[in-house]
Amino acid sequence: MRGARTGCTVQTPRPEHWIGRDEAATLCDLFAARVARTPDALAYRFYSPRRHEWISLTWAQVSARVQRWQAVLAEAGVQPGDRVAIMLRNSPEWLCVDQAVMALGAVTVGLFCADTPASNAHLIKDSGARVLVAVKARWVERIVEADTCPQLETALVFNGEVDEAGRIRGAEAALANAAEDHRAGVSVSADALASLVYTSGSTGRARGAMLTHANLLFNAQACADALPTIEDEHALSYVPLPHSYERVVNAYRAMVTGGVITFCRHPRFLGLTLARAPITTLIGVPRVYERFYIELNRWLLRRPRFVRRLVAFTITLGESVFEREQGRSRRRARHLLWPFLRYFVARRCLRLFGADMQYAVSGAAALPYPVARTLVGLGVPVLQGYGLTEAGPVVSVNRLHDNAIDSVGIVLEGVETKVGPDNELLVRGAGVMRGYWQDEAATARTISAGGWLHTGDKVSRLDKNRLYLTGRMKEVIVMTTGEKASPEPLEEALRLDDLVERAVVVGEARPVLAAIVSCPADTLVPVIRRLGLDPNAPASLTSSRLENFFLARFSELLAGYPAHAQIRRVAITTDRWSQANDLITATDKTRRRRVARCYARDIARLYGRRAPGEKADVSQNTNLG
């Protein structure tokens, strides 16, 4: 192995209102220190659909809500070490429950509202969660229908029918009767378990990464040091809070810096929130930047040709100015036009995205180069980062004045990296997880002697602590939403369908998963006829009617998998895959990459204009949460 490197950054003086490293040993300490430091400062903003208005909460008001939750959870019997599942949309309530659980010495388990009932039931059962806090009673009922979850004693819900004498209770009624000044009276240590963050492994089943208070707090403080300091910072929270990426880089970092979090309760309101809220910082995944890129191009198509050329020139000029500011090119005469074009052209384009944006962070998956170039060219610095849940989660991120958009950034202060066999990136530091929940074998495979975490990512070069990634050690698909999926178990499940002979799942750097399936013609023809299609017409294979037929069958086969691991598009072929056409190995394994190249046109058709640009992605595989 090559020698280890330690991340190093030039430290700038922290503003007085920041919480220093020596002021908090746990996340509970961090929250208490923030409330004491700025009790009347704005903490959270969110839109209430019931009241049709934006609501603001100060740190003192948030603290009062946290104490009420402590009382409710204590009454429900939550003890130190217990697991409490949270199934809420992004909101102050999520973080209030999170803080209350940790103050009681218990452990949070985040569930995804959009996930399948069976997947969430697996997380509850595997973690042994005794209490669940959810939005709707119906969600709880569906989870229990998928699995009885006998260890789940209480579910606190905000909507739907409740049974106060049974398992499902009303959260609002419980909070209304709770004491405002409840004190947990529990001493929480830095090495105590704070959260189980479930992440998909190579087996397809999610495993719980055990993250301690020290893990998460170290990462939040390191991110605060690495990211730009902004006065009166307003960050947008839209990445689901069960992700450690969203909690650490946004929520916990805001407690360190005193920033304001504006919540977007659902992705469909993302554009509206960006347009109406004074967002200065966006911590996001590539998919949101791709959406802006697509919307900008749609807007330009409705404009005269000279407008399109002017915007293209502005982006090219803005990128040139960016390279000069980074010290990678010299000043040119045309750079004098940049202030004018930035105000009258770039600013107009950014109205689709958020005119107050000062910088954006992209993590969790590969960022397409054309998207990064467009944002940088319009004057919005994009800082790409890299990490994984098991690392706490951030490992590296670009800096504002040392930003190479073809890399995944500079290693954080206090994080060590080295290159192992086959160019695998190994990471060690205070953010690395304790291990996998109740899975010592997987822990031993992932964390080697000396505390080195095997990331599973290949690194092309590790130069001056800047990381450049080239791919994965194992077959794992990382989508632009930041979710990961292992294709092998999905393909095995699809092959259980009697119409499917072979299947390959794709979706790297795409928003959703798709499948190319090979079906014997003799079994497919009767289906095509039954659907009212012509089996002799090539267009029948690309018919939406046939695709929807397969999607319905596949949804049944994949019912136990998370929502992000569901197949959303299908390309059907009657071609036979064999050793003769080099699509099958001598050991009868499908050559996934060769199949993807052979059916590249079909894949492009499935994804349409959402496909990445011609230039290689900034990073082939990243997972930041």
Image: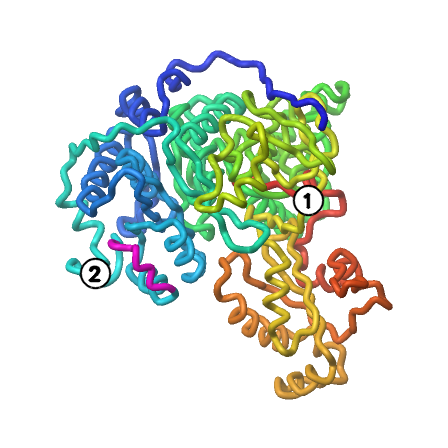
Vertically, is 440 above or below 379? below
Q: Residue visible at 41% across and 61% down?
A: 117
Left/right placement of residue 85 relative to residue 500 reads left
For residue 380, say whether it is visible. Answer: no
Q: Nearer the viewer, residue 80 or 29?
A: 80
Q: From the image, which quarter does the N terminus lie in?
A: top right
Mark 1 neighbour class, 10 Å CA radius: few under 14, some 14 to 19, many 20 or more = some
User: Does the magenta-highlighted stretch encompass residue 149?
Assistant: yes
Residue of label 1: 473
- Residue extending farthest right: 580
- Label 1 sits on what residue type? Met
Question: Magenta region, mostly helix, strand or loop?
Answer: loop
Given this view, does label 1 or label 2 mark the residue nearer the observer? 1
Residue 577: image location, x then y, percent: 78, 69
Can you give x and y, in whole percent of width and height, for residue 376 in the image? 64, 33
Q: Which residues are magenta?
A: 147-154
Which residue is under mark 2? 162
Q: Where does the image place residue 125, in percent across and percent down from the top left?
A: 38, 55
Residue at point 39%, 58% (across, down): 121
Question: Disc 1 and disc 2: Cα gap in Å?
Answer: 48 Å
Under circle 2, the secondary element is loop
Instruction: Specify the amino acid type for callout 2.
Output: Val
Q: Position of residue 489 (x, y in %)?
A: 60, 60
For the residue pair 578 and 94, the one nearer the viewer reads as 578
Q: Please tell me whether residue 532 is drawn above or below residue 419 in the rendered image.
A: below
The way the protein has been coloured in the rendering is rainbow
Q: Is residue 514 left or right of residue 72?
A: right
The quadrant in which residue 487 appears is: bottom right
Q: Are marks 1 and 2 in contact (CB under 8 Å)?
A: no
